[in-house]
Amino acid sequence: MGTTQLESVQEPKYWHLKTVLSEALDSDFAVGEILPNERELAARFGVARATLRQALEQLELEGRLQRRRGVGTTVAPPRVGVAVSTAQHDWTGGGAGEAWQSADCRTAAAPAAVAGMLDVAGDEPVHIVRRIRLTHGQAVAAELLYVPAASVPDLSAIETPSGPARARSVVRELHRLGLDGQDRSVELGSARADDAKELDRLPGAPVLVVTTRYLAAGGTAAVSVATYRADTCRLTFGDSGDLEISHDDRTQQAS
Amino acid sequence: MGTTQLESVQEPKYWHLKTVLSEALDSDFAVGEILPNERELAARFGVARATLRQALEQLELEGRLQRRRGVGTTVAPPRVGVAVSTAQHDWTGGGAGEAWQSADCRTAAAPAAVAGMLDVAGDEPVHIVRRIRLTHGQAVAAELLYVPAASVPDLSAIETPSGPARARSVVRELHRLGLDGQDRSVELGSARADDAKELDRLPGAPVLVVTTRYLAAGGTAAVSVATYRADTCRLTFGDSGDLEISHDDRTQQAS
DNA sequence: CAGTGGTCTAGACCACCCT
DNA sequence: GGGTGGTCTAGACCACTGT
């Protein structure tokens, strides 16, 4: 019959929804504005809530929305550019409005994967420094810095054996070593419970895991595993001075 | 009554499931092995399929599983380290077993965000080169390389106006410019339909979006937007020679 | 064709935040 | 307490892959 097959394509509903919402966000909403709640949105678009949520999840993954339990869904600001640069390094603390905040230090065996990158046995205890990275007052990353005892020989063992003060001591001693180079890798992960708490996210939230091996005196002086909030961060690797991308670069869009 | 509250903690089922599955993968399964299907797994753990799927999704996000419609769920190999280095660059093609494969070239206006990074007007047409990055025969990244006409003045306009041959010409001309530096950023995104197809993933699959601005002769010579499969890739930024991390570093785990 | 993962529904209850 | 997002269920059907 004359049933014109409009929408002949078999595009998933949630994908189409995401596109529609994405365009609505561009035109009808300001940053920080709160959206109608999920039940109402679902009703408005004539889909089940689960389907709507699938679309919202994608938009959150792309950094366009921010959802908080008990509060609501808001339009997210553009992602923050976070420098993970080579030069102005930074176990010192970093520049401008940014900072690593040493939160704690304990001594324990490193996970096998980390022990393998350090030059230590799997069960040898190392200093484990916990740091939080703040940008504009917001926590954007949580880091575990693994430092073999051999890297900080002058560390006075008598001082406070743990806590923030100890953490700062370790970082200070480490800094005196100088730095020959570093190897770094970035991959996608999901937040462990403790990291999630520091980052004000739910466990399992997507994070960018930056693993750095610091080289000094011909060996591996330390290994850092930093988890950055993937929803709000854009990692920048400056190679020639800073740059400010006027970033309305909406990560990806439907074709 | 005497209902002992075992499992008093309020840990989501899918989270607990993920942990259990993760340990099972470590001990009972080999890379490439196929898991029981979702309906059976769900039954075996006494949960709804949707709940099981939530756990599988997380494990896939962390690169531990690979799911293919019509086939099944298999245990994924460790992530591939993909060099996104500073030195041996690489609009030339790259080293060893790796390569960018120029697939196509067309001329059109760049998206607003890209035009802003280039020094061109939003509606000025630029060369858009499509390239695919192969590693061990597998496509790991799809790239769009935006090249203003001004960057490749010697490009003979008469030659094939589009297609792979044209793409290679543009890259060759670009390479003759030399390189003063580059700014790079990495963020999480979701695959557009066309990228997803190249990467053998479904639309919306998580990808690492690497945006690079190539600097030459005091200006921006080109901008590259490359989307890497987040499930299989670990981006490496070597700063001092190569390294081979014996990487059984399982991105993240429950505490 | 049978079997797989992918999408979708219409409910329910829970954990959290605010007032 | 009322409203929000987060979890979970038990189904159904679809799209794709292999044989």
Image (cartoon, coloured by chain):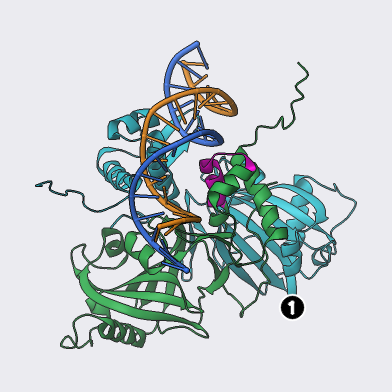
Chain colours: A cyan, B green, C orange, D blue
Residue B48 sits inside the magenta stretch: yes
Residue B172 sits inside the magenta stretch: no
Query: Where's residue B74, x and y in %?
Result: 57, 62
Q: Which residue is drawn at 26% across and 61% down?
A: B111
Q: What residue type is labelled 1?
A: Gly
Query: Which SS does the magenta portion mostly show?
Result: helix
Q: Which residue is drawn at 76% across and 62% down?
A: A112
Chain part drawn in magenta: B45-58
The residue tagged with tag 1: helix, strand or loop?
loop
Q: Name the residue under label 1.
A: A218
The answer to which image quadrant residue A67 occupies is top left
Relative to B49, does residue A150 appear above or below in the rendering? below
Between A204 and C3, the one lying in front of the other is C3
Quarter occupied by the C terminus of chain A: bottom left
Q: Which residue is drawn at 29% across and 35% down?
A: A45
Q: Residue furthest right?
A: A158
Check the residue under mark 1 and report the chain it is in.
A
Between A219 and A174, the one lying in front of the other is A219
Residue A198 appears anywhere in the view: no
Residue A69 appears anywhere in the view: yes
Between A34 and B43, the one lying in front of the other is B43
Q: Which residue is drawn at 72% across and 64% down?
A: A113
Relative to A220, does residue A61 appear above or below in the rendering? above
Between B156 and A80, the one lying in front of the other is B156
